[in-house]
Image (spheres, rainbow, N blue to C red):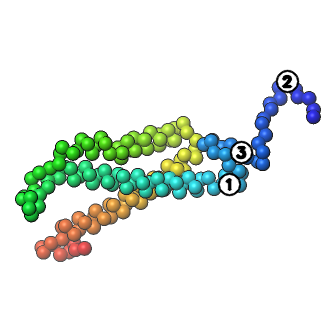
Amino acid sequence: MAPRAPGDIVRPRRLSGVVVRPLNFTVRPRVDALLAPILLFLGFYAGTVFGTQMSRWGVLLWVSTIKHGGDFLGPPKRRLLWAFPFILLLHPAPYLVVFLVVGTVWALQGKVAPLWLWLLGGFYVYIAIFGFKMLRLYRKHLRRVTAGPNNRSRGP
């Protein structure tokens, strides 16, 4: 072994070609190519969980603010406004939104590793698909509601 000069940089060697990447994942070079699609899929899956929570939270807020009534309750006149603050503050969805906004801003500013953009990309793809589906269902519902005996041109 040759003697080292005072300015030489000694780098530690990893066994069997292991490389350390920015997200503190330790992967082999062949598996590194699969990391982005895996993070994209995990982001898509996280979007399914988040989309469900957001829709649940939205329905709970809507139900607590509309007037309730019915056949045995009489005409619609009561609201569940007493439940609104509890739903607003104790449901996990608003906290998930804050966490998501902060994480997205950090990823776009470069404060976290670029691989997090793949995770967020999968997440936002699912949220976009979910939003378009909900918009389509809402428009279909509006067409049914506005179609009546005098407006047959806007049927289902």
Asked if the residue at tag 2 contacts the one at tag 1, i.e. Cβ–Cβ closer than 8 Å, the answer is: no
Q: Where is residue 94 in the image (x, y as percent from the top left)?
A: 35, 43
Asked if the residue at tag 3 contacts the one at tag 1, i.e. Cβ–Cβ closer than 8 Å, the answer is: no
- Residue type at mark 2? Pro
Q: Write down the quadrant of residue 98 in the picture.
A: top left
Toward the viewer: 86 or 37?
86
- Disc with the residue nearer the chain's start (1 vs 2): 2
The residue wearing badge 2 is 6
Extreme residue in the right direction: 2
- Disc with the residue nearer the chain's start (2 vs 3): 2
How many angstroms separate mark 1 from mark 2 (CA)? 37 Å
Q: Considering the numbered disc 3 on the image, is that residue within a helix, a strand or a loop?
A: strand
Q: Where is residue 123 in the image (x, y as percent from the top left)?
A: 47, 52
How many angstroms separate mark 1 from mark 3 (CA)? 10 Å
Q: Considering the numbered disc 2 on the image, is that residue within a helix, a strand or a loop?
A: loop
Q: Position of residue 56 (x, y in %)?
A: 32, 54
Question: Local crowd at mark 2 within 10 Å, few (<14), some, or many (≥20)?
Answer: few
What residue do we see at 85% from left, 24% from top? 6
The residue wearing badge 1 is 31
User: Where residue 19 is drawn, which disc sits there?
Assistant: 3
